[in-house]
Amino acid sequence: MNILILLACLYGWAYAQSNLECGISKYPDAGSGGSGNPSEHIVGGIISRRHEFPWTVLMNWRSGNNFQQNCGGTLIDNRWVISARHCVYANDPPTDYQLWLKTNVRTDPNGNRAEDGVMYVPELIVRHPEYDSNSYENDLVMFKLPQNVTFDDDLRPACLPPLNDATNWTGTIVTHSGWGNTERNGPATPEQRYTNMQVINYDTCWLETLPDAIGSEERTLCVRGNGTDAGDGDSGGPHVTKVDGRWTLIGVQSWGYWPAGVRPSMINKVSAALPWINEVRANN
Ligand SMILES: *[C@@H]1O[C@H](CO)[C@@H](O)[C@H](O)[C@H]1NC(C)=O
Ligand SMILES: *[C@@H]1O[C@H](CO)[C@@H](O)[C@H](O)[C@H]1NC(C)=O
Ligand SMILES: *[C@@H]1O[C@H](CO)[C@@H](O)[C@H](O)[C@H]1NC(C)=O
């Protein structure tokens, strides 16, 4: 009995400790630069301050002998990164990917070296088994890092929403960061950028995206900026908002339209995916 209580206390303590690390930016006013310049689409033209969003991960994939930036991701604890399923092929090995943590500027033209940051080749890729490549419902993938990472002011996970979270996010302002292109067919940006967007009503979104299929209301959130948006290469990246003072990952970028910032962008709702996320972390 005593041992059980002790274990329970230790577990509670460890859980609280890991939780205390999440969702903190060393900039108290992180994300407050506004939404950016609508003429520079993507992530609207605001260059992030160094490690302003310490959970944002740069993802490269193999193209022949080179690696190039293809997506973003989010650090969710000391071992796991979540991104979008469409950022990986069905069967390619973990060694075809690179995850760059603590990175702000992506300087190498071949994309296989970042100016700063630490590169990890994931040891495992877990693809969401119910990914729907038509509607992009469950467009999620998880990468296990080869070792635990140590948090500091420049590297922290985003908080996850609580299990069975029933928040109606409509109207919430979310901050999206990444290295995607700032114009159609343009190159990825060297510097990480961010923009703020707003969650819009699902029914409105459904109408505005016809005749395309979008994921179910249960698993999908739609966001829109004032002329700003995610660009190609921002897929998989975080949409965070402050909940009780902590930056919390409410969505993972999935898909949108060009021209950016007119029609909504679709993101996969993290609260609905939590049972899967927790199962993956527990079983691997
Ligand atoms: C890695 O982190 C997990 C979760 O905090 C912990 O349970 C595990 O013991 C750590 N592993 C190592 C090798 O430190
Ligand atoms: C969420 O709130 C908006 C209004 O802010 C409302 O239109 C919408 O129906 C609500 N969604 C749900 C699922 O309750
Ligand atoms: C866009 O502008 C409208 C009207 O001014 C405002 O209500 C909304 O919050 C803005 N969206 C963002 C993401 O700032």
Image (cartoon, rainbow, N blue to C red):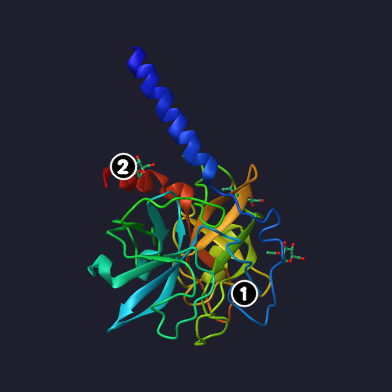
Q: Looking at the picture, does residue 256 appear above or below residue 79? A: below
- Whole-number angstrom distance, CA of label 1 to CA of label 2: 38 Å
Question: What number is the disc on residue 55?
Answer: none
Q: Which residue is drawn at the image coordinates 65% and 45% (left, top)? A: 245
Q: Is residue 25 visible?
A: yes
Of labels 1 and 2, the one closer to you: 2
Residue plotted at (50% across, 34% down): 16
* Residue position for label 1: 261
Q: Indicate if the residue with disc 2 has its beta carbon within 8 Å of ligand 1.
A: no
Describe the element under mark 2 as helix, strand or loop.
helix
- Which percent across, then down, holds residue 277? 37, 48
| Viewer-proximal residue among 254 and 179 | 179
Residue 282 location, x and y as percent? 31, 42
Determine if residue 164 is in view.
Answer: no
Relative to 235, is 14 above or below? above
Query: Where the N terminus falls, by quadrant?
Result: top left
Give coordinates of residue 278: x percent, y percent.
37, 44
Residue type at mark 2 is Ala
Q: Which mark is residue 282?
A: 2
Q: Is residue 164 left or right of residue 262?
A: left
Q: Nearer the viewer, residue 268 or 155?
A: 155
Q: Residues within 10 Å of mark 1 (few under 14, many from 20)?
A: many
